[in-house]
Amino acid sequence: LAKTTQPISMDSYEGQEVNITCSHNNIATNDYITWYQQFPSQGPRFIIQGYKTKVTNEVASLFIPADRKSSTLSLPRVSLSDTAVYYCLVGDNQAGTALIFGKGTTLSVSS
Amino acid sequence: GAVVSQHPSRVICKSGTSVKIECRSLDFQATTMFWYRQFPKQSLMLMATSNEGSKATYEQGVEKDKFLINHASLTLSTLTVTSAHPEDSSFYICSARDTQRGGWDEQFFGPGTRLTVL
């Protein structure tokens, strides 16, 4: 599985847009990019997934450049409740394939 | 969306005892379930892949005789920590994929079980 690198931590204020970038230089052709969010003492929650270009849903956008060696999770107008750890994962969609988590990015949102 | 439950949510036990943790997929079938362990301030670490009707596959460094996994049905996998010791205290999380659907985003996580061994 491709290794991912993210910033260990980020700080933001309420109402700001937050962009978390993940590098995955060894991404394979069949790999997708998926982001999960985890609050303390809870299981991870799926945020967004993409293969290339841009994907947007009700909570976030995912930007993937043409070479796919990096991706950026964009959280618009964060609130205090967005304080969490965000994980970037890269892998194929094969059934039975486990998700391998990296260190993640701890986002702290202040008022 | 699909829901994965775990029971119990918290458990405290004495050193040397065994603890069973259940993972259930509530509204879908899961041929494969995954067990993770997470220590404070650390990421999730994959322990094993649980396969319905067959033996689990353990990651390197995980003792299969200590962490017994049974996936007896398409909706239930259990993890038994045998002869638990304080160093086994951790947050155990399971996840499951919907067998009927594809896509990586269909892997759902349980709420986790906090194990404390005294």
Image (spheres, coloured by chain):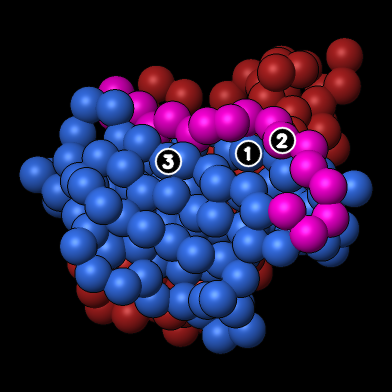
| Contact between labelled residues 3 and 2, with CB atoms less than 8 Å apart | no
A81 with respect to A88 (left or right): right
Identify whether B60 is placed above or below A8: below
Mark 3 = which residue?
B23
Report the Cα–Cα distance between label 2 and label 1: 7 Å
For mark 3, name the chain. B
Mark 2 = which residue?
B11
- Classify 10 Å Cα crowding around label 2: few (below 14), some (14-19), many (20 and above): some
The picture places residue A69, in percent across and down from the top left corner, at 46, 73
Mark 1 residue type: Thr
Identity of the residue drawn at 59% across and 38% down? B112
The picture places residue B55, in percent across and down from the top left corner, at 31, 73
Q: Nearer the viewer, mark 2 or mark 3?
A: 2
Q: Could you confirm whether marks 2 and 1 are on the same chain? A: yes
For mark 1, name the chain. B
Disc 2, SS:
strand
Q: Could you confirm whether marks 2 and 3 are on the same chain? A: yes
Identity of the residue drawn at 19% across and 34% down? B28
For mark 2, name the chain. B
Colour used to depict chain B in the structure image? blue
Mark 2 residue type: Val
Colour used to depict chain A in the structure image? red
Span highlighted in magenta in the image: B1-17
Disc 1, SS:
strand
